[in-house]
Amino acid sequence: LWERVRPLLPPTPPQPKGGRPFADDRACFEGIAHVLRNGLRWRPMPTCYPSGVTCWRRHKAWTEAGVWGRVWKR
């Protein structure tokens, strides 16, 4: 599934001022899928995924970018 979804994701924005690196897209995708598949809340994410806030923000960004519509079509 990841191999089909990866090309549909927007590129990671540059960080000209440095800062903490972005969480891995695949880990965020797996965390989002875990929450949606199990009907969970974002906050109490298992520690094997990025934080719930990180996954929620990535889900929001990908939704605004139209990723999920393209995923369903593929």
Image: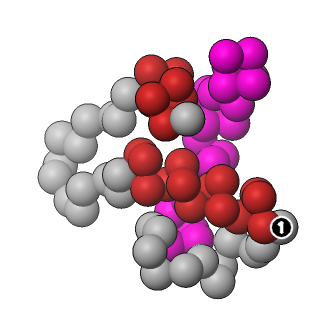
The stretch drawn in magenta includes residue 20:
no
Q: Name the residue under label 1.
A: 39
Q: How many labels does the image show?
A: 1
Q: What percent of the width, then of the height, locates residue 16?
A: 18, 41
Horizontally, is 22 left or right of 58 in the view? Answer: left
Q: Can I make out residue 8 in this image?
A: yes
Q: Quadrant of the N terminus?
A: top right
Magenta stretch: give its range: 51-74
Q: What percent of the width, then of the height, locates residue 2?
A: 49, 36
The residue drawn where x is 35% and y is 52% is 24
Q: Residue flagged by tag 1: what amino acid is it?
A: Gly
Residue in the foreground of this view, choosing between 36 and 16:
36
The residue drawn where x is 17% and y is 49% is 17
Horizontally, is 28 left or right of 74 in the view? Answer: left
Determine which quarter of the picture holds residue 65. top right
Q: What percent of the width, then of the height, locates residue 62?
A: 60, 37
Query: Vertical placement of 54 versus 66: above or below?
Result: below
Secondary structure type for disc 1: loop
Query: Vertical placement of 43 versus 15: above or below?
Result: below
- Neighbour tally class for label 1: few under 14, some 14-19, many 20 plus, Cα within 10 Å: few
Q: What percent of the width, then of the height, locates residue 34?
A: 66, 62
Q: In which quarter of the image is the C terminus?
A: top right
Horizontally, is 27 left or right of 31 in the view? Answer: left
The residue drawn where x is 38% and y is 28% is 11
Instruction: From the image, give the main secondary structure of the stretch colored magenta.
Output: helix
